[in-house]
Image (spheres, helix red, strand yellow):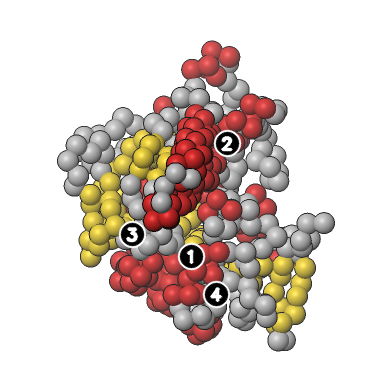
Amino acid sequence: MSDWTPLVISGAIFVAAAILVLLLMRLTARLREGARRLTRIAMTVALVFGAGALTYALLVTPSQLGGVMKRMGPPPATQDEAAPGSAREPPPARRAFRKADRPADLAPAPKGDSVPAKPVVPPSPRRSTPEEKAAEPDYHSVPVFFGTDRKRDEAAGAKRISFGSERARKLLLGQALVTVPRIHQVPQVERPWSIRIPFTNITIYEQAEDPKKHFTIQRIGVLSEEEFLRLVRARLASSSRNKDQALIFVHGYNTPFDAALYRAAQIAYDLRFDGAPFVYSWPSGGGLGSYTYDRDSSRQSEPFLKAFLELVVARSGAKSVNIIAHSMGNLPLLHVLSDLKKLAAARPDVTINQIILAAPDVDRDVFENLARQIQGVGRGITLYASSSDLAMRASRRFGGGVPRAGDVPEDGPVVVAGIDTIDITAVSTAWLALNHSGYAESKALINDIGLLLRTGERPPEKRIPILERIERRGAWYWRYPQPK
């Protein structure tokens, strides 16, 4: 299907709605006053539906629109080129990392729900011949280890296992193999475009998945604790760029299970992270109208998240652990970090390296109290906040008007000793996600996260010289300058 298809379909809907409006306008002149009022209502509904369909289709098709623009402009950078803003490395080492994640280098899928047990062994660093290059797949594969307390979806006829929004009330472990297309553009998550009715789970049309164009789940399985740890250790043993490092992602509000896997894979891939990537997926409702359910689900997930973090820290073999939490995912994380602090103190062989709190959807006063309890849990804690985050404004209404920790009100963002607060308003470009995933959908922030994981350099202006240092009530925070 052509990349122009979503625009053509949406345009046709809009034109049809406009024609309907014109016909109704002519009919209005011949009807009595009562009928005329009904007609005006119908006209409004038709116009709103047409405009809404066009707007919504455009909003849910970032990768398709990007494909159209790419055809009109220069060809996209290949995987053989360094990610924008990152330092180039010698091709041989980079190719070894890339091939290590390809399906061709993985063991065959075993029977049942389990995933490959054979460790990934990087090939010798050499240049591919033209014949080998032509035979390479049009995508790369990123293994993502997951923990979840979602209930498994037992839908009949499902092609693979999946997890819904119901609570399992127990911790499940597994591994997924997520494909990333070669045409991937940092920092997007390319997915099939679709037309959905807003605020519902009803899909009118959805494009077929294609690993050449989209992030897809190639393989997924639920594992026993022993098998899970064995595969994690094998992954850590095969890593080179991020030797013995773990990266744990905790997603936020309105996030289905599959979307959490895609985001974790995108972050790891764009960071060129070849350690062990993890995601913890709590039972989010996956809908804009599920805010209260999500908030309650995130809190009831705390004991399972705690068990998952302790498993990774104490038994995975990782020597350095990094954590990124987004939105409402910060709520359960902040409540369990104090326990993780005690565990880390008892394990001098394991370091909690960097903790990144992205757009925390947490009451500001609650956050300040919790933040004081977790000081020193890691080598560094960074908070990303934004004044253009529409989701933060919406959640403030649910929270009685109290600002959220991820918001930047007129008097400035939350500032707590031991936490580097960075106002990312100027570089948050995630307008397709209500400016709520700017930490992962901004090249500047992806680069900053990469620097944090590699160097841990502080204060922030040492990593990013353009940052402005702002004083607020005797404390400091940092801000990206507005573009001139």
| Alpha-carbon span between mark 2 and mark 3 | 28 Å
Reading the chain from its start, which is encountered first: label 2 or label 3?
Answer: 2
Please tell me in which quadrant of the rendered image residue 168 appears: bottom left
> Badge 4 is on which residue?
405
Q: Where does residue 446 sit, x and y in percent of width and height? A: 61, 52
Kindly identify which numbered label has been placed on residue 350.
none
Q: Looking at the image, which is closer to me, 55 or 4?
A: 55
Q: Where does residue 361 sit, x and y in percent of width and height? A: 49, 70
Q: Residue furthest right?
A: 484
Q: Seen in the image, is 441 located left or right of residue 329?
A: right
Q: Residue furthest top?
A: 131
Give amino acid for label 3.
Answer: Gly
Kindly identify which numbered label has been placed on residue 327.
1
Please tell me in which quadrant of the rendered image residue 80 appears: top right
* Mark nearer the viewer, 2 or 3: 2
> Badge 3 is on which residue?
285
Assess disc 2: are there few (<14), some (14-19) or many (≥20) residues with their C-alpha within 10 Å of its C-alpha. Answer: some
